[in-house]
Amino acid sequence: MSQENRTGRPRGRPPEGGASRLSRTEAGLRGPFLCFFTFAVLWLVVASLLALIAAVKLHRPDFLGACALTTYGRVAAAAQDTFVYGWGFNALFAVNFWLMAQLGRFEFRNGWLATLGGLAWNLALTYGVVQVFRGELGGFALLDLPREVGPVLILAFLFAGLWSVVTYARRPSGHNFASQWYVIGATFAFPIVFLLGQLMVQWFPSVGTVPALAHAWFVQNLMLLWFGASTLASAYYFIPKILGRPLRHYYLAPVGFWTFFLFAGWTAPAALLGGPIPIWLQSVGVVASVMSIVPVIIVGINFYSTLSVDGGWSRAWNSTTLRFVTVGVVCFSLFGGLSTVFSARDFSAVLAFTSFAQGQQQLLTYGALTMTLFGASYFVLPRLTGSLWPSAKLVHLHFWAASLGLLVAVVASLAGGWQVGHLLADPAVSTAQAGDATAVWTLAGSIAAMLFLVAHVAFALNAFGMILASTSPTSEGRPD
Amino acid sequence: MNDRNRHPDRNRPSQGNPGPGPDGLSDGRLVEVHSQLARDKEEPREGFSLTPIVIVFIFCGFGFWGGLYLTRNSGNFASTAFDVNAPKAAASAGPIEFEPDAAKGEKLFVAQCAACHQPTGLGVPGAFPPLAGSPWVAGNEERLIKAVLAGLAGEIEVKGVKYNANMPNIGAGLKDAQVAHIATYVRQAWGNTAGPVMDSQVAVVRKAIGARGQYVPADLLKEHPLETK
């Protein structure tokens, strides 16, 4: 990475190595990783295109409005599904995989099983998205794919995701590391959450408010236990790895891990404050949201104290990977702080039904997760393909467009939600006036979506140029 | 992963940090170092901060707050409690659901009124008029409320007997609900059969009369003449 320090150009592995320098661990990983990663980047571009259309339609409803296929409901749902299930999951399969194999010194023998799971996952998702465009979508966000898609996704997850568990169980060294805990936790939590969410919302919906509660629980756990935990896994790996020194106050990390998994699963009812669910559930949600600040503080202590010594911040800034990861870590802390503060009932009364919650979620799914995954890609891809990133300009374009887009999107959602929420709560202001106030914020949302699209196309061009330029791996392996 | 360590001359930082190179720990080393760290705390050294102690206190504070919050806002974990205010209202029978209670009224009466009007409600002949069977306390509630809130001063005729009244404004120092309890008791004890008085009625009258001196009984009668039976 010091190569980058000098030239600002992210080279990853020096060129003299080439593909023949793949370690045996990496050689086994290469096929599944590139398969997942290719799907992930394709879905990312599709998702950002759809998100741009949906964002423009918020302030120009007649844009592409003549045809049922491109109505807001379908486009927005498809954009979210492709972003979460297409980009988020495929990229996490790849990166979590890589983390577990590297940390556990595991050599893949039957990587094709994971690839098979990945193919099934993406075929099922494609079918689901096509159905969404045909209008066959449910009413619950992220559980709106047709219900027959769900079982396939779960099976595919078992094939693709549970390799992480195999990797962990079979690791030759008895040690373990924080990244491994978080990946294992996430990998166990997600199938259970997904299964219960589907059963209670899509297959056997109960009466009354139970499906809404089950849905909130599903979304919150998907966000925190799968996306949040995976983000932390990558951050725990890349920060000490690239800085070249162990994490400070590392003995606190187990406390952070257990409190994270203890409290995160209870936070869901806080999203339904004031709704028709028993008051004790709402209060439990509030308390869990506030208590979630404990793991957020602990990982903050781990990361920031490690970054703060020995010029860590400037080295993080000069390493492409760590620059992305650091943005991700800061966004995770911001997300945790916001969740704690804005779980209070007084805030919820004003901010419910505005874009505020969307801004918080974006801070996690994009700010924390996606930025961290970008950083991971800049680290892993050169090592697995044995080639360089084709264009340093595109890397810079990627970083700045993504960061600026993130800033605009999150500020627009949070500030817009704050303003509109207060207008809605004011009896002197009519609903129409409050609606007019959203205009400037939705315009900002479109600008952010445009920036995201630019960033992601730049990233995709660079990544595919790199994958296509890579030589085929040799099987002899490089002793590690 | 170790390829970078093969070029130490190029990558060595100026600080000369021993141990792993500046460009990254190898994965095996990363895991080992941290397993060691997870077992042992970092050695205290100069400039060692007391962060862990502080955060232990902070976390205990959060836990304490969480328990308190849950206890106060859980509606006794009833599946039928949906509103954060409902459990409090049910517990204290406070301002939301007022029920005039003659038993509470009796206690207040004994403390505040019985010195003159006597626990029997018969008063003291020649000095304090009776309440039992008095038309002043039956009928229109406002007459009674006004008398209790503002007091009376002047000649008053009760059941054919004239008294020279000097009743202080006892009700001014009591809450609406307490005045309502007393009035309800007075209207229903000793054979009286008038209806109860609500705290909302007291609140309305208290606001209407404002801060004023004692009523002259004749003026009070002009506002609320005695009902003929």
Image (cartoon, helix red, strand yellow):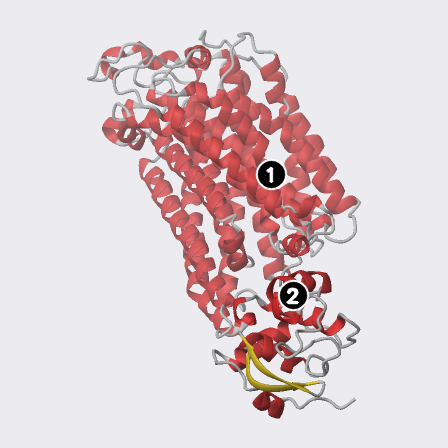
Q: Nearer the viewer, residue A130 or A295?
A: A295
Residue pointed to by mark 1: A222
Q: Residues within 10 Å of mark 2 (few under 14, many from 20)?
A: many
Q: Residues within 10 Å of mark 1 (few under 14, many from 20)?
A: many
Q: Chain of mark 2?
A: B
Q: Is residue A405 left or right of residue B186?
A: left
Image position of A331 with respect to A181: above or below: below
- Residue B109's label in the rendered image is 2
Residue A260 falls in image quadrant: top right
* Amino acid type at mark 1: Leu
Task: Please provide percent x and percent y for residue A25.
Answer: 51, 14
* Amino acid type at mark 2: Phe
Q: Is residue B34 left or right of residue B86?
A: left
Q: Residue furthest left?
A: B14
Q: Is residue B208 left or right of residue A130?
A: left
Q: Residue at x 44, y 49 (%)?
A: A453
Task: Please provide percent x and percent y for residue B169.
Answer: 53, 74
Q: Nearer the viewer, residue A259 or A320?
A: A259
Q: How far is the residue under mark 1 from the one under mark 2?
A: 63 Å
Q: Secondary structure at mark 1?
A: helix
Q: Give a yes or no on whether discs 1 and 2 share a subunit.
A: no
Q: Nearer the viewer, residue A320 or A439?
A: A439
Residue B229 falls in image quadrant: bottom right
